[in-house]
Image: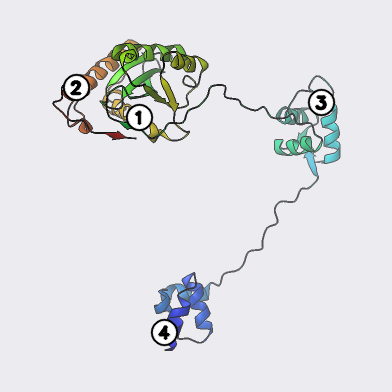
Amino acid sequence: MRTQHFKRIGKKKAPRLETALIWIERGYPVRTVLRICDVPRSTYYYRLRHPEQRKPVSTGRPISGYSYDKAGKVVRDARIKGYLRRLIQGPNASFGYRKLTVLLRRRYQLIINKKKVYRLCKELQLLAPQRERRHHVPKKIANNRIVTGPNQLWQLDIKYGYIAGERRHFYLASIIDVFDRAIVAYHRGKACSTSDILKVVQKAILKRNIHEQAHKLVIRTDNGPQFISKAFYAYCEQADVEHERIPNKTPNKNAYIESFHSILEKECYLRNCFERYEEAFAEVDRFIRYYNNDRIHGSLKDWPPKEYLRLVTSGELKPEEIAL
């Protein structure tokens, strides 16, 4: 009865070692208590040999109210505030706390941290209000969708490649159709500006005759500077294309283009060492042709994207809905 009473009450408390110590102090057998609380004997006896000492609670680093100069002389905060007032009366009136810190170190030989200068400037009300970042382009968050056919949802992203001979990078912007995994259009070059992205989108729209279809095309991108520009937003409005952007740090929302980039990295970039831009561009062209026309895709019933789309269009293959 005594053991059952202890098991019913003691096991409700945590941690187990602390519970065991409580019941042992009340006079219960050590071995019985340790067995019920599932505490190793070595743990219990180690605790007896090494009792824990409570550390004093820290109240934080006190504000000293002074700093030092390079000679080791104490400089009070009141004097530092006078230095700050003197600095902002001249041509340095528009300086922020970071540049004022530099001037304090150079002119007055102070050993001072920019965080303290920020605090002193805040006490003197010398800090200008921070600028508010305004995004003039509306942002439409990527929604959960069900894709049942081609040209319903495209994903667009940019990947880097490396030219070993030039020691420089090149860019590859690709558009993938989520339904058939085909690379509809792409751009590769030494740069990738908004105008390059617009040309790729125009090329893809003309290639797939998007203007003749009944439903609206959705293009999904991340939040890169090319995709949040006013020019890209204006083109999507003009072309009657819905543009949605994934939230920050959610590459899974762009999983299909990210998967293609992984394949490209493993089967193209890592297998070649490019010496010139022309060599890299030719190899990328070759690989994308191979990817669209010949490379079998596991999620497309082991068919290449081009052949899979032909089989689905002719009715020889029943497509599966894609939820993302």
Viewer-nearest of labels 4 and 3? 4
Q: Are marks 4 and 3 in contact (CB under 8 Å)?
A: no
Which residue position holds label 1? 258
Judge from the rendering whether residue 235 lies leftward or rightward of residue 79; answer left or right.
left
Residue 307 or 174: which is nearer the viewer? 307
Which residue position holds label 3? 88
Disc nearer the start of the sequence (3/1): 3
**Picture quadrant where residue 121 is located:** top right
Say which mark, if any, is on residue 313.
2
Tell me the amino acid under the disc marked 1: Glu
Q: Are marks 2 and 1 in contact (CB under 8 Å)?
A: no
**Picture quadrant where residue 205 is located:** top left
**Picture quadrant where residue 84 is located:** top right
Tell me the amino acid under the disc marked 3: Ile
Viewport quadrant of the N terminus: bottom left
Residue 49 lies, with reference to residue 70, above or below; the image says below
Q: Position of residue 37 (x, y in %)?
A: 43, 75
**Marks 3/2: CA distance?**
72 Å
Viewport quadrant of the C terminus: top left
Q: Secondary structure at mark 1?
A: helix
Q: Are marks 3 and 2 in contact (CB under 8 Å)?
A: no
Can the viewer see residue 273?
Answer: yes
Residue farthest toward the left in the current orientation of the protein: 316
**Marks 4/2: CA distance?**
72 Å
Say which mark, if any, is on residue 4.
4
Viewer-nearest of labels 3 and 1? 1
Disc nearer the start of the sequence (2/1): 1
Disc nearer the start of the sequence (4/3): 4
Disc nearer the start of the sequence (3/2): 3
**Marks 4/3: CA distance?**
77 Å
